[in-house]
Image (cartoon, coloured by chain):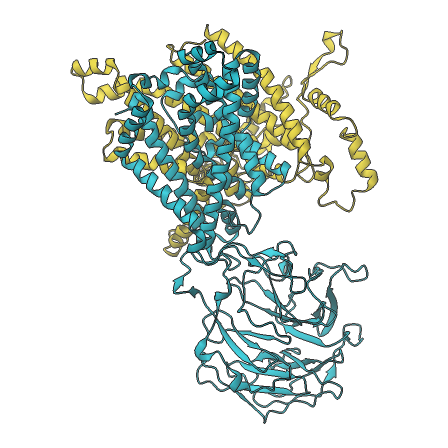
Chain colours: A cyan, B yellow
């Protein structure tokens, strides 16, 4: 169908089904001698049998047929092959609303494995059941092993020292001899965090109290010989004391949003807000991420609105860390209800892009071990076993402490195609995308065939002005560069897969209309049509019951050949942003999503493209074989 | 029917087609969205009620749709008739295609097409030359060794060409070039790929810096001639070759322009290769098909029975006949490429019309879409017609009815 693809302007990436005879087709009529070889065969059945026997001898056709059967089977079996398929994910703990479906390929709960040998740390920590703890990880004694700092509900700061022999071996023991500064009197519930606030390379301490104040203490000694100052209230740049409506959960983060080498502060508060303080040379400049854009809040470049609306109420704990495979920062919000939210910044860039995602595009690609929903769950992330992946310790209010390890191999199955920028498994995404693209191709070609055939048949059968009008309309469609037309229609309807398919149908039908018209023209003067007319059948009946069935064969062949072209065009349109939305599992879209990092991570682009290539190649091989058999001039 | 009559008939048939195209592009671009929306953007704050009102009046958006369409056609019509009865007052002007708002500041659509089309054309022509030079011999080998190993190999090559998503091929090629260049650089053999400002035509090809410009400048010295400012052709290869740095000795300036030419050549190669592979696939298949068909003709049998060598039969007798459809296909492909190689230009950031079209559609830049569609449809339809006529010209056996 060279002319078809040609005139659709798909030539750039189109499937150029070239046949010798179509060159005679420069005028729009299909010459009837093309299929004249039929007359040499007695019956249609015999002809088809003959064609099939010829096809059986063509290795390329067989290869194409095998490939496409394989791909179709894979697409149909997708739910059994890949464990990370689309599944509903309840994001809203309060109303049970499905806010977002997990995208295909999202690595599910098994991403974190509870490490059975080592999972129960309750013995090591020996916490009281009715006491909530707030934890913090720090290498307090500077021995390159992670220690745990726990703040409890009964005015205590507990220091668990890591006495494991090597870096990957963790064994925590309560160090009772360690002297912390005296806690402020009116604080019963302690939420600790540490960081080097005065830049003397010794870790300092900050706590949030249930009275809504933040206190800090500076270590004036060395890591091994601590000398803490008394707790003093934390003030902001104007000198006023920071105060929150209830328990404050401070997190000193080293992600340094304003890039001044000073550690910054993020506070999760009981009024369901996240406050961010920029450390402006030892003063705290105020900046709020809150639900509504506050007119009074300083609007600077960092002002981002956290989409927390409707997600819950109560207090928030914030963790900011590297948890995804890229270098971007992630943020985890832990709510009172025990649910957690995972935000990731898109891309390798640091602070300015942080939390660029809005609520609509928020999805959870990292799922954590499903725990019983208990209030007071607290998380601890760190690369405990030093394999460059964040592992996890979970504290529950029942005094249970569990350890989970991040894992890249699930059920002994490695992630053979790698993971994408947000941690999805490319292999399973490819399979789901294959299913989507094949479905799309069949859908588009079917509708284009139905519409085109009906219009072409009517034009061919009635002739005269009907024919002229309809053929001029198809001319208009052929005069457009097809890719641009499809692009414009997709943009006009709105960018999603369904509208893309509509656009492709609009572009594609005209080709079938021409073929159908040519076929009907060559059939309508045959004797059986005369006979049908003589019997007095209605035109509709003649067209649909007699003429069309007899001219369907070349149309079906053309449609088969076009399936590959549709896949290619749909992928191309999705690639330039018309069709699938970012993050969707569609082959072209996956390539577009991976394009940002394709130099560093070529597999993001390679595997989806390979799948497209295989689909289209298989269809083209089938087409080549069919054409060799169909075309009398080069028939063996 | 004679060729001339056929050409006239086809030309006349273009009129309703172009009307249809204009109606469709008008409806499409109007259904895409609010034309005012494309003016929002960076100056969102400044788009006040008053300004919206002003824009609406300026663009004629307060009129009903059919009036808008008629006005649109009036703007397209290149003949201005200030006094209808006085033919002397009539004059031609370039059609007004509106202003493309996806640029800041907005640029006239026609200017954009004129400045960007050479880049696309250069890429298209360059890749087509590639495709023809490689594709035709491959097709011949494939046809003469039908069903043997060379045939299978060339068929697979051709098939993979048409099956390859071109944007994927482009990206993979970039990875390959990047990595191999890194390796070569480690070995101290790296090709420097200076994609820097001097490659930017607008910045460096002021008129005195260009051989054409120098010639024009000299001619402009003549009192009776004024050719005005010239010119860069917009074709990077040509512009780089003609580059004439000011204040540099002649020999050295030739070396500089040669270096620039090679630089431009290196940069056009990867995108052209991607496009060429697809085109090559089409040409190979076409040549193969036509050759197989021709080799079964009686006159080949006659030549064989005369005892001519196979070489002579293939190249003197068969190829001449088989090339006719191949060249037609090449012409049609070129026409397709000229209307914008959207994906390739996107992947390689090529400043052609295809990439502009993508930007225009995503920015809902209505004037740009209308203008682009009208112009490309015209190019496309005309070049198709040209190919058809050319076809008849090289093959007088064709009959028209």
Q: Quadrant of the C terminus of chain B?
A: top left
Q: Is residue A290 above or below residue A195?
A: above
With A92 as the anchor, is A103 left or right in this view? left
In the picture as drawn, the residue positioned furthest to the top comes out as B1
User: Which residue is at the front of the view, B255 or B313?
Assistant: B313
Q: Is residue A64 above or below residue A168?
A: above
**Which residue: 52% across, 18% down?**
A540
**Which residue: 41% across, 30% down?**
A16
Q: Quadrant of residue B212?
A: top right
Q: Is residue A336 above or below residue A77?
A: below
User: Which residue is at the front of the view, B294 or B254?
Assistant: B294
In the picture as drawn, the residue positioned furthest to the bottom comes out as A177
Instruction: Residue B234: tell me if it is visible.
Output: no
User: Which residue is at the front of the view, A175 or A210?
Assistant: A210
With A418 as the anchor, is B35 left or right in this view? right
**Which residue: 34% across, 39% down?**
A65
Q: Quadrant of residue B128?
A: top left
Residue A217 drawn at (x, y percent): 68, 84
Q: Is residue B388 above or below residue A360?
A: above
Residue A411 drawn at (x, y percent): 41, 65
**Which residue: 41% across, 46% down?**
A610
């Amino acid at each position: 169908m060279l002319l078809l693809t040609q005139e659709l302007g798909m030539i750039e990436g189109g499937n150029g089904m070239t046949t010798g005879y179509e060159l005679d087709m420069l005028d729009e009529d299909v010459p009837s001698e093309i299929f004249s070889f039929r007359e040499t065969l007695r019956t249609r059945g015999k002809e088809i049998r003959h064609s099939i026997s010829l096809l059986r001898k063509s290795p390329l056709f067989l290869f194409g047929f095998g490939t496409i059967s394989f791909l179709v089977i894979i697409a149909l079996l997708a739910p059994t092959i890949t464990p990370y398929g689309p599944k509903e994910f309840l994001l809203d703990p309060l109303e049970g609303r499905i806010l977002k479906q997990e995208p295909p390929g999202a690595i599910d709960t098994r991403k974190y494995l509870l490490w059975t040998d080592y999972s129960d740390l309750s013995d090591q920590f020996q916490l009281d059941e009715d006491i909530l703890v707030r934890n913090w990880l720090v290498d307090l004694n500077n021995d390159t092993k992670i220690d745990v700092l726990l703040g409890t509900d009964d005015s205590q700061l507990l220091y668990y020292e890591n006495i494991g022999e090597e870096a990957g071996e963790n064994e925590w023991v309560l160090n009772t001899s360690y002297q912390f500064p005296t806690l402020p009197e009116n604080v019963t519930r302690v939420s600790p965090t540490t960081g080097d606030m005065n830049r003397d390379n010794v870790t300092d301490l900050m706590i949030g109290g249930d009275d809504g104040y933040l206190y800090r203490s500076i270590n004036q000694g060395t890591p091994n010989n601590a000398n803490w100052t008394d707790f003093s209230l934390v003030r902001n740049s104007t000198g006023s004391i920071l105060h929150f409506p209830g328990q404050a959960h401070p997190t000193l983060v080293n992600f340094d949003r304003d890039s001044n080498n000073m550690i910054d502060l993020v506070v999760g508060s009981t009024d369901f807000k996240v406050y961010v303080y920029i450390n402006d040379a030892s003063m705290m400049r105020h900046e709020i991420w809150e639900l509504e854009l506050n007119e009074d809040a300083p609007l600077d470049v960092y002002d981002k609105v956290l989409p927390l609306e409707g997600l819950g109420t109560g207090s928030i704990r914030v963790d900011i860390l590297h948890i995804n495979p890229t270098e971007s920062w992630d943020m985890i919000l832990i709510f009172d209800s025990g649910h957690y939210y995972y935000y990731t910044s898109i891309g390798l860039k640091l602070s300015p892009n942080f939390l660029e995602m809005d609520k609509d595009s928020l999805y959870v690609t990292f799922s954590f071990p499903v725990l019983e929903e208990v209030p007071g769950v607290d998380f601890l992330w760190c690369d405990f076993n030093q394999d460059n992946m964040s592992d996890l310790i979970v504290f529950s209010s029942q005094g249970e402490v569990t350890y989970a390890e991040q894992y890249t191999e699930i059920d002994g199955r490695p992630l053979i195609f790698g993971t994408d920028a947000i941690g999805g498994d490319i292999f399973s995404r490819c399979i789901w995308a294959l299913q989507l693209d094949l479905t799309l191709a069949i859908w588009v070609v079917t509708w284009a065939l139905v519409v085109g055939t009906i219009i072409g048949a009517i034009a061919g059968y009635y002739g005269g002005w009907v024919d002229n009008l309809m053929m001029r309309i198809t001319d208009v469609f052929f005069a457009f560069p097809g890719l641009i037309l499809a692009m414009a229609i997709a943009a006009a309807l709105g960018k999603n897969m369904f509208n893309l398919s509509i656009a492709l149908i609009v572009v594609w039908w005209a080709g079938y209309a021409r073929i159908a018209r040519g076929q009907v023209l060559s059939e309508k003067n045959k004797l059986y049509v005369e006979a049908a007319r003589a019997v007095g059948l209605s035109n509709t009946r003649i067209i649909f019951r007699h003429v069309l069935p007899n001219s369907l064969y070349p149309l079906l062949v053309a449609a088969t050949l076009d399936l590959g072209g549709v896949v290619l065009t749909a992928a191309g349109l999705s690639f330039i942003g018309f069709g699938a939305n970012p993050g969707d599992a569609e082959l072209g879209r996956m390539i577009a999503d991976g394009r940002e990092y394709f130099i560093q991570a070529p597999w993001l682009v390679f595997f989806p493209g390979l799948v497209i290539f295989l689909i289209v190649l298989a269809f083209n091989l089938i087409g080549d074989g069919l054409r060799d058999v169909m075309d009398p001039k080069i028939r063996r | 029917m004679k060729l001339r009559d056929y050409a006239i008939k086809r030309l006349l048939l273009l009129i309703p087609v172009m009307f249809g195209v204009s109606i469709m592009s008008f409806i499409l671009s109007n259904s895409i969205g609010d034309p005012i929306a494309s003016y929002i953007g960076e100056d969102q704050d400044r788009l006040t009620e008053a300004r919206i009102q002003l824009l609406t009046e300026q663009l004629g958006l307060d009129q009903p749709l059919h009036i808008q369409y008629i006005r649109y056609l009036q703007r397209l019509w290149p003949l201005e008739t200030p006094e209808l009865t006085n033919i002397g007052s009539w004059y031609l002007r370039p059609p007004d295609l509106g202003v493309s708002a996806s640029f800041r500041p907005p640029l006239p659509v026609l200017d954009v097409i004129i400045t960007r089309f050479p880049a696309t054309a250069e890429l298209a022509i360059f890749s087509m030359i590639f495709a023809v030079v490689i594709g035709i011999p491959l097709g011949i080998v494939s046809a003469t060794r039908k069903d043997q190993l060379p045939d299978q190999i060339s068929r697979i090559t051709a098939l993979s060409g048409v099956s390859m998503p071109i944007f994927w091929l482009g990206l993979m090629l970039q990875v390959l070039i990047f990595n191999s260049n890194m390796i070569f650089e480690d070995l101290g053999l790296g090709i420097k790929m200076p994609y820097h400002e001097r490659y930017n035509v607008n910045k460096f090809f002021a008129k005195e810096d260009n051989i054409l410009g120098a010639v024009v400048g000299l001619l402009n010295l003549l009192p009776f001639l004024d050719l005005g400012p010239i010119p860069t052709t917009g074709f990077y290869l040509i512009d780089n070759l003609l580059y004439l740095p000011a204040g540099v000795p002649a020999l050295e300036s030739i070396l500089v322009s040669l270096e620039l030419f090679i630089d431009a050549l290196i940069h056009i190669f990867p995108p052209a290769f991607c496009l060429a592979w697809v085109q090559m696939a089409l040409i190979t298949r076409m040549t193969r098909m036509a050759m197989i068909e021709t080799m079964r003709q009686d006159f080949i049998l006659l030549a064989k029975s005369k005892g001519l060598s196979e070489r002579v039969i293939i190249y003197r007798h068969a190829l001449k006949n088989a090339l006719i459809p191949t060249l037609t296909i090449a012409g049609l492909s070129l026409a397709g490429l000229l209307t914008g190689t959207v994906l390739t230009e996107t992947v390689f950031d090529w400043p052609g019309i295809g990439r502009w079209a993508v930007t225009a559609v995503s920015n809902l830049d209505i004037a740009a879409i209308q203008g682009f569609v009208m112009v490309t449809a015209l190019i496309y339809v005309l070049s198709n017609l040209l190919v058809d006529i050319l076809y008849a010209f090289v093959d007088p056996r064709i009959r028209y009815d």
